[in-house]
Image: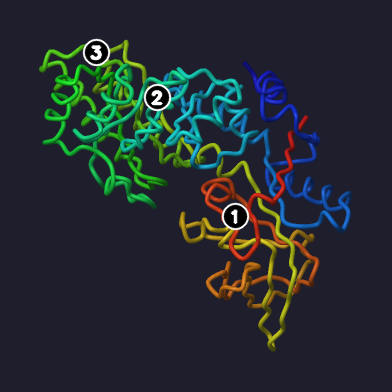
Amino acid sequence: MDGGIHMQAVLVAAGVRDRMVLGIKRDALKDRDAVTGFIRSILATSSPAQRSAFHVLDLTKLVDLFMAWRAALRDVRPCYAVKCNPDSALLGALAALGAGFDCASRAEIEAVLALGVEPGSIIYANPCKADAHIEYAAEVGVNLTTYDSEEEVAKVKRCHPNCELLLRIKGPYGGKAKVDLGTKYGAHADEVVPLLRAAQRAGLNVAGASFHVGTGASCTDVYRGAIESARAAFDAAADLGMPPMRILDIGGGFMAGSAFDEAATVIKTALAQHFADLPCVEVIAEPGRYFAETAFTLVARVIGKRTRGEVREYWIDDGVYGSLNCILMDYYVPRPRSQATPRPGEKTYTSTVFGPTCDSLDTVVTGYQLPEMSVGDWLVFDDMGAYAMAAGSNFNGFATSDIKIYMAYSS
């Protein structure tokens, strides 16, 4: 399928078709310029009452990312990590493109099922789950989950005895990840056999193994060691006389761009080295930020200003208790730019940008160079789709859920 056919599927997808999607000419755009033009068209046509912070979801970017995944890792099915960004249009578009889903709670499973996704396309990828959530998974037919403790085996046996398991292992550290999930999850090498035996005694089928190298891993070679460790788990299960494992989940942590290309090369080489003799093994992954991060842009309005000599201080209508919580929660480095077209030789000022709440912690950037701005002007934040809206709050009465999302695609 080419990009045009993919886009047609996205535009009629659940979560997308009932919301306004505006088309923009491809020859007028090239990524950032395209989104900037779209933002200007929104501002030009919106009423003053509607002029508050908003997001832009670039559906064309999303399709391009999916096609790039298929080209680089054709035999690895992406199961999107819903926790990264649960926007229904994003979920529906990915479902239409053929993605599965990594859900970590009842609410995430409900959100995906509501879009018509089959339960078999969902992995309940949370190694430690509440009883009630496991019982709900049993009710709706989500029959694959992860585990990394004997206590979880007993819980699944009690609440969902027909569920299959993936043993979550702790891969070798060294990925220089933004967030090392191995500090919380993953069986150590000496725990693999006891955990396999625990499932065997409980009569639960271990369908495979999973790992996660960490969120935003910058050293892609870590996948090599993790895949080698996963193969050791497969062999251990075989030695115990368990049914052959058939699923390998290589987790998430992927970032779009050259880092993804490097990771894909390492993964394909490692799979060929360690799993070539097991051709029936299904390989899946749990990308979140790879799809969400660069597909979203935040546009925030300047609602206040203070001048102190050559220093400028601005207040905007979104901040670290809203979408920009990713500054604190996900190590996002904001690089805001003025929505206005820069003028040649335009002077910039050392600037601080605050969010709208009354907390001094609500500071977006300090000592940052920006042109002179006025109340009513706009700042643009690129790459704002990962762990941003998902973790926002209603602190001080500013609701993240009130921030509108506009969708665009290029024709």
State which tag comes first along the sequence, 1 or 2: 2
Query: Disc 1 vs disc 2: Cβ atoms closer than 8 Å?
Result: no
Q: Secondary structure at mark 3?
A: loop
Would residue 143 be found to the left or right of residue 45 on screen?
Answer: left
**Which residue type does callout 1 highlight?**
Ser
* Drawn side of residue 162 relative to residue 256, left or right: left
Residue position for label 1 = 323
Image height of 345 relative to 389, above or below: below
Q: Residue at x 36, y 17 (%)?
A: 282
Q: What distance separates the C-alpha of mark 3 from that of mark 1?
A: 46 Å
Give the CA distance from mark 1 to mark 2. 29 Å
Label 3: which residue? 277
Find residue 29 and report its horizontal and vertical position in percent.
75, 41
Which residue is denoted by mark 2 in the rendering?
284
Q: Quadrant of residue 14?
A: top right
Tell me the crowding category of disc 2: few under 14, some 14 to 19, or many 20 or more residues within 10 angstroms, Cα based.
many
Quarter of the image with the C terminus in it: top right
User: Which SS class for mark 1?
Assistant: helix
| Label 2 – label 3 distance at C-alpha | 18 Å
